[in-house]
Each structure stands twice: as C-alpha cells, then as structure tokens.
Image: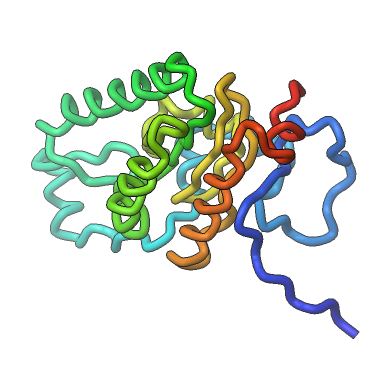
C-alpha cells in the first residue's frame, strides 16, 4: 500500500550546511529542494534556467526575438529589456545589495530576504502584502528584495539553496538563516509560509533560541 500524500511544507529548515544532514541520497525528492553537491557548482546561467518561477510570464514572441537579433532589444538573464534599461537594472541591483547590508547593520531582530523574478506574476502580486506586513512589524523585522536573475545574488542563491521564486528567507540579526518558505504551490501557500516566518522572528521564542544557535 502506497504512502499517504503529504502536502508541501510552509517553511523549510534543511540547509546545505546542516551538520546533521545525511550523505546518502534521499529516496524521494525533497519539497524544499535537492541538496546534492554538484548543483552548487553550476554556472549562474544553468542555475537560473532551472529555477522554478511561480506564474512565469510567457516567452517573447518570434517577432521580439527577431528584433533582439537585429539589435532592437537585448536579453539580460531571462527578461527581455530595452538597451536603455541596463543602467536602471544595475542601479536596482546595487540598491538591493545596499538595502540588505543596511538591514543587517541596523540591528533589527530579523530580516526577511525575498528572492523574486521580474517574470514572476505571483512575486509581483505579493508586493502590496509585503509592504503591509512590514508596516505591521514596525522595527522588529524588515523586508529586502533580491532579484534571482541578478548574478550578484549568486552567493546567496547558493548559500540558501534557492530553487524557486518567490522564496522568503528569514535571517536573524546576525544574518544567519532560520528558515525559508516552501515551494510555492499557490498564492495562499506562500502567504501562509510568510506568516509562519514572521511568527518565528520573535527573538524570545523557543524556536528562535533553538534555530539561531551558531552552526
């Protein structure tokens, strides 16, 4: 008799650097991402091509591809952008990097790092909710965006084993990861996982004390 189906988790606690992780392969795929070592050494292009994007935008039409080949538009990462968009994208990437550094230096109890993709419709639909949750949290938690298509975030993509977007990673005041949201099966599933993360950010809670211990 087959095993009963289990729904995907809201949050994931298994990380590549977990000292208790077993070297033997798992008999079934992990809902939080496979942690096999060869994946860690893939290039950013190979890595991002395998990223699961919830609500992925449709591929550009053939006419757009022809225009790109003729120099009218060019492709950066996954998204099709006009030539003049490169400085804007660079500025946005720099701003995201500075925002994370400022959030960790500010001494907040927790920071939520949101990995997204410009092609992700679900990611875009969550921005209003994210702003609302940040306001409700006051100074106890801050949200920082991280474009998963930007190669400058490659160290974080590898370190936190990001295989899908949107993915929210809860960091403590020292920048150590406590948990991340699970594979986004639906908008409500992502929202539930995000609420679970925000409940965990209490520094006095038993979960926070256990998970925030140095690895």
The residue at the far top in this view is 105
Query: Which of the 4 quarters of the picture holds residue 141?
Result: top left
Compared across the picture, whether 214 is left or right of 169 comes to right
Total marks in image: 0
Return the x and y of residue 196 as percentages of the image width and height.
57, 52
Which residue is drawn at the image coordinates 25% and 28% (left, top)?
A: 92
Image: 65 above or below 55: above
Return the x and y of residue 122 as percentages of the image width and height.
36, 59
Compared across the picture, whether 27 is left or right of 78 comes to right
Which residue is drawn at the image coordinates 41% and 28% (left, top)?
A: 151
Q: Is residue 42 visible?
A: yes
Query: Which of the 4 quarters of the picture holds residue 215?
Result: top right
Seen from the viewer's position, the closer of residues 26 and 106 is 106
Which residue is drawn at the image coordinates 46% and 32% (left, top)?
A: 140
Return the x and y of residue 101 as percentages of the image width and height.
42, 17
Image: 147 above or below 152: below
Seen from the viewer's position, the closer of residues 89 and 176 is 176
Return the x and y of residue 189 as percentages of the image width and height.
52, 64
Query: Which of the 4 quarters of the picture holds residue 145?
Result: top left
Q: Is residue 146 visible?
A: no
Which residue is drawn at the image coordinates 44% and 50% (left, top)?
A: 166
The residue at the far bottom in this view is 1
Compared across the picture, whether 25 is left or right of 41 comes to right
Image: 168 above or below 111: below
The quarter of the picture where the N terminus appears is: bottom right
Type of colouring: rainbow
Seen from the viewer's position, the closer of residues 119 and 72 is 119
């Amino acid at each position: 008799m087959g095993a009963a189906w289990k729904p995907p988790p809201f949050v994931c606690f298994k990380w590549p650097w977990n000292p208790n992780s077993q070297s033997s392969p798992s008999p079934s795929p992990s809902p939080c991402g496979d942690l096999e070592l060869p994946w860690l050494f893939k290039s950013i292009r190979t890595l991002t091509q395998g990223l699961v994007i919830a609500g992925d935008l449709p591929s550009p039409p053939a006419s757009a591809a022809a225009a790109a080949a003729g120099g009218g538009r060019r492709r950066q990462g996954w998204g099709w952008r006009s030539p003049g968009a490169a400085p804007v994208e660079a500025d946005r990437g720099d701003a995201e990097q500075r925002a994370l550094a400022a959030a960790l230096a500010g001494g907040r109890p927790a920071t939520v790092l949101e990995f997204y993709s410009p092609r992700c419709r679900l990611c875009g639909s969550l921005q209003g909710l994210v702003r609302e949750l940040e306001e409700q949290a006051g100074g106890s938690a801050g949200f920082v965006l991280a474009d998963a298509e930007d190669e400058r975030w490659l160290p974080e993509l590898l370190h936190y084993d990001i295989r899908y977007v949107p993915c929210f990673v809860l960091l403590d005041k020292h920048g150590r990861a406590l948990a991340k949201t699970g594979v986004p099966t639906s908008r409500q599933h992502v929202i539930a996982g995000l609420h679970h993360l925000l409940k965990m950010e209490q520094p006095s809670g038993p979960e926070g004390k256990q998970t925030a211990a140095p690895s």
